[in-house]
Amino acid sequence: MSQVTSAETTNMGKAPSNLGQVGVIMKYTFLDYFRSRRFFILLVIALVISAILTGVIGYYRPASLMASSLGFYAGWWGMSATFVVALSGIFFGGDAISGEFQNKTGYFTLPNPVRRSSVYVGKWLASFIASTAILTIFTAITLANGLFYFGANVPYQFGESVLFAWFYLAAVLGFTFFFSSLFKSGSYSILVTAILFLFAFNLVQSLVSSLAQIEPWFLLSYGSQIIGNILTVPYPAHTAITSFGPEGRGPSFTTFNVGIPEGLMIMAVYFVVTAVLGLILFEKKEFN
Amino acid sequence: MTTRQPFIENYLPSLECQVLQDNVHSIEAVNLSKVYGSFTALSNLNLKIEGAKCVGFLGPNGAGKTTTLKMLTDLIRPSSGKALIDGINVHTHKRQALNSVGSVIETPEIYPSLTPREALGMIAELRGVKHSEKKRRIEEVVEEVRMSEWIDKRVGKFSKGMKQRICVASALLHDPSVIILDEPTTGLDPRGMSEVKDIVKSLKNKNRLIFMSSHILSEVADICDEVAIIDHGKLLVYDTLPKVTAKFSGGETVLEVGFSRPLSDGILRSTIPAISGVTSTERRDEMNVILRYNGTVTAQENILKELVKLDGGLISYRPATSALEEVYLNLISDSR
Ligand SMILES: Nc1ncnc2c1ncn2[C@@H]1O[C@H](COP(=O)(O)OP(=O)(O)O)[C@@H](O)[C@H]1O
Ligand SMILES: [Mg+2]
């Protein structure tokens, strides 16, 4: 009896595992990135940055970059990699969660038997993979230029730096997702994350370290400096004291350089803390 | 052997319970409340609907309908109390509770860059619709909401009503046994309204429990078997449609009577009220009269005969659609 009735009335299937649903969300988030041209716009920006660097370096051949292959990678990659990562964070993470509220797309997805954490993780993974693709393309162009000027002699520090940039990407996306679940307006959260990553972090960092003379160990941007520092040989000293005035008796000035374990730790803590907080926020958030 | 006997005895009732759970579906609110700051959007709702039927959730704008339905689908959390579907707490066990539920709450948006086929594909995959059935099923539900020619166009270009239809399709995708709809016809043009009404009616034929909010009385009277009326976050009544109408109109039935010629005051005030069963008359305009009577269809038949005998040019004679309306308006004004 129950067989007959349930066959004509109930489900055509049972909801897949949480992991399966994470995969579904990931797949359709990708589809949305491609369709909405979000991915291509960021790709074009990364290509434009690459083209400008290629053109300027090819034309002016600045001495500091041409002296050694390490100097070349430090000059090219050390300056631009964090910028490309920050842009990825803003593009893919800025409105990831807040957009579900502002655009009301959450009303379509969430009243289904799916955990909010699965939606969060699925969207995060999609943004991480899409950003990784952009970063990989940017790395390939950097390498191509390096190979052109210095041949196959690629310093191993560049490999480490790429790896650090990838860790930084995880931390940045963790942070932008957390921020986007703080807000209910997508445009607002994009704006705030853009300001944070393009200006605010650096500004606070200079204020804290230069004026207050405190090591800014609590700032993600400080941790991210290992990406550039690793390309400086020898690795810069943790603190450097510069003194002014005759015979160095005037005011002295300390600059801080983050060490590798410290930098990795800062990124890891940022990633873990923001991922946990972001998930909790999204779980608690109400659609109203 | 001695330990087996109690085992079987214990096992049987739970088996029966299992069978029951498979067939009888329920939506239940237990002391359900939602408070925003000092404002109570829903106050201590206790409501259990079960079986295979369509229940209308009726109330004016701001009554607390959407608030209730959002708690039944875990879009918001209860301030206190519980929302249960098939006896399972929606907030604490969302995946199990919503497995057999299809819903459209407020007006959802779909990723504008996707097509209905893709958006419904996402829901089908989240729901675990079998891969072999996915394509056919998506086309079937899109056909059901009359959107077939748009199935591969991007949602971003759709009107509000078209998106609403796709949302209804998404709620039907996995052939749910419990359906929750929040004012499903708002935002649709008149043809769309009647099409969606027809879809809901056709869903009733199968063994399903449908809970549908609305502020449109005729819609509820037309589609639903039972009605729950809510205002200011409080449940005013929950019963079958005929009982609600009878209970609150004092057993009277309201008729609308139309004449082809203006009706004289004499006929209105004395002749018609003299017909047995008639309790009151009221002029609607020159040629239309609202008439109330007590009694069965036999009384109604007799009244019609007498009205024809008046030779006043009787041309129409029908139960007022306002029977429910009257109850509704009375209840709502009492609760203010
Ligand atoms: N987030 C919110 N904050 C404050 N008040 C709210 C919120 N959401 C809904 N309300 C109020 O709760 C009441 C019930 O709303 P709702 O359930 O949407 O009514 P309706 O019956 O029209 O669907 C309304 O007065 C509404 O203004
Ligand atoms: Mg509403």
Image (spheres, grey):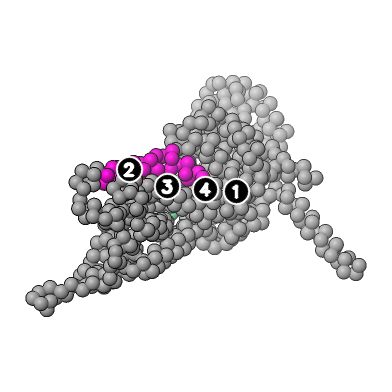
Mark nearer the N terminus (4 vs 2): 4
Per the model, the C-alpha gap separating discs 2 and 1 is: 60 Å
| Region of the chain picked out in magenta, as a range | A26-54
User: Which residue, given by chain and number where applicable, does mark 4 sit on?
Assistant: A25
Element marked by disc 1: strand
Mark 4 close to ligand 1, CB under 8 Å: no
The answer to whether B128 is drawn above or below residue B3 in the figure is: above
User: Which residue, given by chain and number where applicable, does mark 2 sit on?
Assistant: A47
Per the model, the C-alpha gap separating discs 4 and 2 is: 28 Å
User: Which residue, given by chain and number where applicable, does mark 1 sit on?
Assistant: B228
Element marked by disc 4: helix
- In x, y percent, where is residue A282? 47, 57
- In x, y percent, where is residue B324? 59, 41
Residue type, label 2: Leu
**Callout 1: residue from which chain?**
B
Residue type, label 3: Ala
